[in-house]
Image: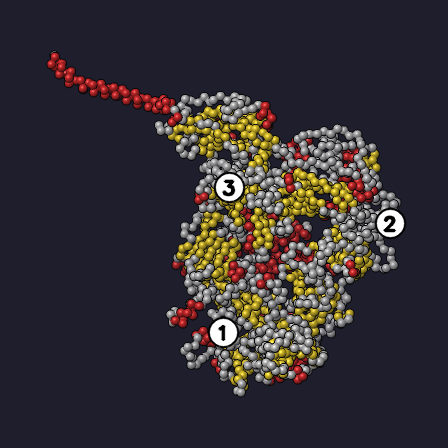
Amino acid sequence: MAGKGQVLGESLLGEEEEEEEEVDPGPPQIDPATGQVIPRPKKKKRRVNKMGRRKLLENLSNKPTDFQIRVKVLEARQLQGGNIQPVAKVTVANQTKQTRVKKSTNSPSWNEAFFFNFKKSPADLMDELVEFKVFNSKKLRSDSLIGSFKCDVGMVYLEPRHSFLHKWLLLSDPEDTMSGAKGYLKVCVCVIGPGDEAPSFKPVASEESDDIESNLLRPAGVQLQPATFTLKLYRAEDIPRMDSAFMQGVKKVFGIGEEQKELVDPYFVFSFAGKEVQSKIMYNNDHPDWNQILKIGIQFPSMCERLKFIVRDWDRMTEDDIVGTHYLPLSLMCSTGEFGPEDDQFDSFLPTFGPSFVNFYGSTREYSDLPDEYDDLNLGKGEGVAYRGRALVEIQTTLGELPEVPVEDINNDDILRVQKFMRRRKYKLHAAFLNATMVSAIDAPVEFEVSIGNYGNKLDENTAPCPSTTQPTNAVFDGCHYYFLPWSGTKPCVVVESSWEDISFRLEGLNLLLKIIDTLEANIEQVRIGIKAKLPTPELAQLLISLLDQLEQDCRKKLPEPTPGRHVSNELDRLTRDYREFELETIANNVIKLKTSATDVLEAMAEVENYLQILKNIAKEPQNSMPDVVIWMISGDKRLAYYRIPANEVLWSQNPDYIGRLCGRLQTLQLKFPGLKAEKEKVSEVPAMLRTKIWLGLANEDDAWHRMQTEGELAVYAETYENQCNIPVVGWTKKGPLGRPKWSDSQGKCSLPRESFEPPPGWRWEGDWYVSPELSMLFDKDAGHKTYMEECYEMHSRLPGTSWGPATRPWTDVKGDEMAPKDSVDLPPGWVWEDVWQIDLSRAVDEEGWEYCVESTMGGYGPVEKRYHLCRRRRWVRTRKLVEDAKQKKHKLIQEKKIEEAAEGWEYAPLFNLKFHATERTMDMVRRRRWHRKMICEKKGADCYFAMKFEGKKKDEDDKEDFNAAYAAPRMFLTFKKPFKYQMRAYIYQARDLLAGDETGLSDPYARLSFLTQSSVTEKKEKSLCPTWDQTLIFEELEIYGDPRAIEENPPEVMIELFDYDKFGSNEFLGRTKAVPMVKLDPADARMPVLQWYPISRGQEDGGELLAAFELFLVPDKNASMESLLAGSDLPFLPPKKGDLFLVPNGIRPVMQRTAIEVLCWGVRNMQKFQLSAVTSPSIEFECGGHVQESNVIKSTKKNPNFTENILFFDVMLPREELYMPPMNIRVRDHRQFGRKPTVGIHVLKSLEEFRCDPVQAELAEDDDGVQGGLVNGGRGGEHVIDMPAEERKVERKSGPQIGQPLKSFPQLELPALFRGKQEEPDPVVDEEIDWWSKYYASTGQTHKCKKYIEKGQDKIEVYQTHLEDVDFTNGFSDFCSTFELQRGKDEEDEESSVVGEFKGGFKVYPLPPDPNDEMPSKVFTNLPSSTPEECIVRVYVICGIDFQPNDTSGLADPYIEIILGNKKISDRDNYKPNTIDPVFGQMFELTTMLPVQKDLTIRIKDYDIISSDDVIGETTIDLENRYLSKVRATCGLQKSYCIAGVNQWRDCIKPRQILENYCKQNHVSGPHFYGNNSVKVGKKIHNLADYEPNKPVDPNVGPADERLALHVLHTLPMVKEHVETRPLFNPIQPGIEQGKIQMWVDIFPKSLGPPGPPFNIEARKAKDYVLRIIIWNTVDVVLDEESITGEKMSDIYVKGWVSGIDEKQKTDVHYRSLDGEGNFNWRFIFPFSYVPAEQVMEVRKKEHFWSLDETVQHLQPNIVIQVWDNDKFSMDDFLGTVSLNLNAMPMPAKKASSCKVSMLPDITTGSEVKLVSLFEQKRLRGFWPVYNDDTGTRTLTGKVEMEMELVSVEEAEERPAGQGQEEPNMNPKLDPPKRPETSFLWFTSPWKTLRYIIWRNYKWYFIGFLVLLLILLLVFLFLYSFPGEVSQWIVNG
């Protein structure tokens, strides 16, 4: 099968990839009901894999990036309707573009490309829609849509190469879905991000037959069925306040207020695939009961992936606010098993959901009237930081109908039915906080709040208070840099009670799957490490088998089932559970098969990765209605940072398999700043690190939590604060203006007198109230500091006109608070003064240190005295230093603590809302102290909230206060008896590839480590991106509470942050990483930590790696009993010191060995200016492992940018392990005047691994014995070796004889100049029809464009779909030397590129003998080519462009080529190609250049503009020097055969035989020895011409035999063959996004080798002019469309014809009044057109608009359209029928009218059965062709046309002229006027004929009858008239 017909539903939801075979390759069947292709039955071979590709879209970034979406609309077929004018419109994310209108056809070919550019985040872009619509442009806009197709961008992105290529879309009517297919549209779509390669939209060669069925993108199940998503929306709850209370306040003032209202007006919006429907608005309601059904009509299965729910808040004045957004992936709600259950497949089911709550997350809930900076989070962008409510919904899908009304009410039965899903149970959420470190908030006390849903939210006024926050604590300095909260032995605990539905069966199933995934990932990692460490196969196999055993065992575990009576499950639960069981069963069975059949570890691992992906796909729970747990850090009333944990991860279960992976376990959390703030503002600090344990479970099971707390005791305390204020004279008192109650909570919000506390039911007091001071108060301001600077300010003042004197407060602190004079500042015990009091002169002060201002309280000090200044001050400072050791300090602290506790425990502050401190100061106006009373629980599960009792309430008090006071929450603590002491050792060895922090492109890095309550810092290394610190940091006296075994199992993390030291300003953050130390409870433990690379990251960017190891020792206690853990031996010795610093000890530091590094220092290129002047005299400094080597200086880069001495040699000690190898730092310095040597560029080579080789052994070489034929057959070894003189020695690698590898060859440098000698060469044979393009098309597989060439069997060339550097064997031409880009300056992401030049060179690394006296191996780099410049001729052949980015509004461009080489520029502006984005250039440019001075060849494509400057479309740059130096001889590709003329004429400047001689000479291979002309010996192998050419060469122009043989031998060697490369173009405006491609190649000819051969002629093919003559003889059986006055069926027939694309229509005259469908014309149409015979296309040149400058060239199929019409004089002519014939492939006409049928014509479905002929071969055809009408969708025969077609060239047309119609010259053949029946005329121009043929013929009997009747009547009248007279006369006479 040509390619599997892809069903969109499959690629969207289905996760099947099948290998399939056709059962019956017969013609496609058509469904008579819908007119669509019925898919053929498929026979399944095997189920290969089951990857949910949709899942790739989940973790997309939210950072805006450049994207380009390219769409090419190729053609449409079978559009419904007759004689329509189709136009296609493409809409991508609200940008719409349209194609040209095509005339009168229902199979239009557009071939137009559109480019849509976006700067959007990938996450947003993937949800946008791509829509294709085809319209009939003739009709009114309202009913002109023929059909449409839409899908989302994500669907395209998931396809291979992010593209749909040449896919047919089935168009349908979105309104009327049952109407079936409206036609097919063929398109290409691709999504390109930065760095993606754009796929080519060129048609594939094999698409001749154009199999629609296999490439049809149709919605699954053949037809888009109409369907309805029915969303039952019941209710919502917990919606936050969204409106201001202003009006409420106004109403209250005027006394017109009703009861307190909820300030939110919610309504619900449900949207999908661009349609949306909304519910009613519930005014002033935060728990709305909507009870409505919302319906959306869709096409099922849909191309869109996510349903979107939004809750909005209605606003009268402003735009409605979004409360929250929830996305529901369709793939989690349905399953697409396309195969039945008998196929061992899971049954499919339609999307279904609920009844279940969905949760909304977004910005914080607290309302403020100001705009919220985190509003974006409510749109569903980024991670929501807070819970914002939930809604109860249910979704069902019904197929086959669309909704009549979008919104209706839910009936009462459903409302009652859903009640059972709302049953709640009580849950408890416990959290214990063990440490809070690296706290960034230091200005106010810090507390942590834990909430789930709205429960526990401290700042929300509507929730009951509960002990959900830790006590507010001041952060304390840790002695180095960071701050921590000093909780010591009393760890705060919180508990939050909440009520939720019991959905434990869902979450437990999810937990089971997540545990299976965790186990599998850990096992995969083990196997990976084994593969990396190159373990022996049996051990790897053992690891793999145990992995598979574990996986099988895990997959057999039982999924939890809902328990009747406890759980209420819905339909989706049942289906999801069945689906998961089916998948687990499948995996288990596959694992068993894999165990028996696996042969290769890597293959098996690929399978296992596959299983992992399947598990990840099913480990998703769509109906997770339990909100996430959120932890907030609050300082004051401000929320600073948060962390969100999914509830299932901390959920407790009785079954250990179902417990959440973090439930009750100690975990380290790094809090995050909300929203994108940290990214936007580049905030580098961590808000805080927390070590916590969290447990969530049913309230009646919470003893499980208490059982877990074995290490400390959980205690509950009642808490209240006693408040006092300081009134002058009176002193401290509770009376007076306190501003808060006498007894209150910590924030003073509510009154909590001690006596009003009563223990809750089930609790009792233990002990009495006691003062419990806040711990952080006990730390002095110098706590943790080793040195401290005391400061005080001396204050002076004066009255105007007087002199300065001491102020009323002569000494103050910086805030202006009074303090003691400087000399009476006491020195604390344990400190000594370092110096005396000094005036601080390092500020803006005068020479005596004074600064002046008008008034001290206003501030605004300045250094210059003015007359109006009345105050001045100066700062005195004095430094003191800590001399005692830490133990004494700790001891002293404990003493102080006891004294403090004995004291009254007051804490003081100037005002209540400021920071409190422990010692009283002069400015302090208020004080408070904390009282605690312990409580004991007597009854399990009793609530511990206090119901406060109050007497005598005042009536006017606010009710809310009372409510809060009535429920006070106690504090909880986990108390530990005593801490264990630990010591942590951090071994920081080195870092590599750090980010640059300074302008020079280097950094001065140092590392700062934080571990629990301590931090430390390494020394800084100057100017390095790869610093080696080699330093051990020791953290002494770490106190950690808790069981050491628990610490061993789950040690705290070490946080390492790297900074760049700056003398001025703050140090710049370079990145951070985390590590876990190895814990040793017994210091005698013999395990050694291993140095590991830890990845460093700064935000989203990668910041290098750090090599380090960490150990944590438990410090033994001398007094401990022998049984205890602490009775271990002593700690290991400290590591050796270097100066004051500890080194990394042996055993941990890497093992070194003596190593050689040879550096090939070739040259520098393209150096950019530095400090505005050019870099002309650079030298290079190489540094590796602390050793430096410097190259010599280049005299002038303008003359020769290469170094004169190329080789540098390092003999250094480097680590033996590749893992620890230091990087190679390459630094370029410029030598400038006055001895300045600035660094102008650096490059860090991370690893030298790729340059490792074995040392070269020198041996004597007598002969060529080692050479095998392998060389000649292109054998290539590992590292290559540069040649040495053949006589002295031969080169061999340690691993064995490797001479057979090709060595470096520089034929073009060594050869003497050769000129073409006059040889006797046969005359060339030339064939007109064969050109270079024939060769090109033959090579690209476009065989219809070069049939003759292929018949002759001539040479083909290599056409590479990428640039030559990327072709495998060329290795980027880095075999001689590699190119290293030089950087400079900081790494700023926004900058385009910081590349400032290139270094060309190479490295070889190999071990040296350890003994310095041993003989050194030979150097690897020897025999280098000359480094002097060489003059070359360069030929650039540009063939064509592919998919250029259009620059004009028309979606096209006018491209032309510009070539730049050095300072030469060739612009081909005059030959621009108008109106095309796929131009055929066919141009060759020849230039001369000096390599390597001018080595970069740039081919730039520009867009021609008449008025504005020409835009650059894109450019590509080729490094000619690399091609010139490469051993694969990339200067001129080797042709397939040696010809002396014709299209394959030899073009190189030297002949094959000389190239071969050269190769042998260079590579020390003996030969070539020719025996005659037909055999040659190269090395030890003999080549015979007969082996290569068994038959005589087909080309008559072949050259001599010896040259041909030499060429055949060369083709066996790794050399570049004749080729065309495809190079992508890039534009600096959109870096990284490809702007199109060009196909081209370059030849380089060194002038020293003589003149090159003639260039190829690659001019584009020219079109030939033809004339098509069509004689319309007659028509037969045309349907009769009119009825004459007389009631006859008739038609006034005429025939119209045109060549589609040229659209100049010609008509015959009218055959009036055809009564039998016959028309006679004898009329000639003449259509001149241009045609390219070789390509079988017609070339149409015409101006798009009358104002267009240039004709647009289009290549179209030569289609002729013949239509039959009915002529009407007073209305529009009626269309009767049409036929479209392709002159290349048209059906043979019928000889007789009777055998002419519609089935003669090819159809999409019957193309293969009709015999087709080409008029270009036949020249003339005559017969009958059918015309048909298909406005109903099926073709109906409406007539037959007899015509004769003749095709003549322009020359023949001049020789045999013929006139149009029946005009002169009426000859060849002469056309007589048609013999039409006499009845054929136009009635009102021939009255006599009308009388004769119409009136007389039809009414003559009426006329005759009328006359006879008239005669009879006349006779009767005459008779009656004359009768009486006659009678009377007769009587009288008679």
Residue 1436: give its label.
none
Residue 793: x %, y % from top left: 64, 79
Q: Is 860 situated above or below 1552? A: below
CB atoms of marks 1 and 3 within 8 Å:
no
In the rendered image of this protein, does residue 1552 appear above or below residue 242? above
First-in-chain label (1 vs 3): 3
From what the image shows, is residue 1017 above or below residue 620?
Answer: below
Q: Which mark is residue 1259?
A: 2
Q: CA distance from mark 1 to mark 3?
A: 73 Å
Which of 302/1559 is in front? Answer: 1559
Pointer 1: what residue? 943
Which three-letter amino acid code belongs to the residue tagged 3? Val
- What residue sits 53% from the left and 41% below the top? 100
Extreme-bottom residue of the structure: 729
The answer to whether 970 appears left or right of 252 in the picture is right
Residue tagged 3: 87
On-image quarter of the C terminus: top left
User: Is the C-beta separation of discs 2 and 1 under 8 Å?
Assistant: no
Q: Position of residue 857 (x, y in %)?
A: 57, 77
Q: Quadrant of residue 863?
A: bottom right
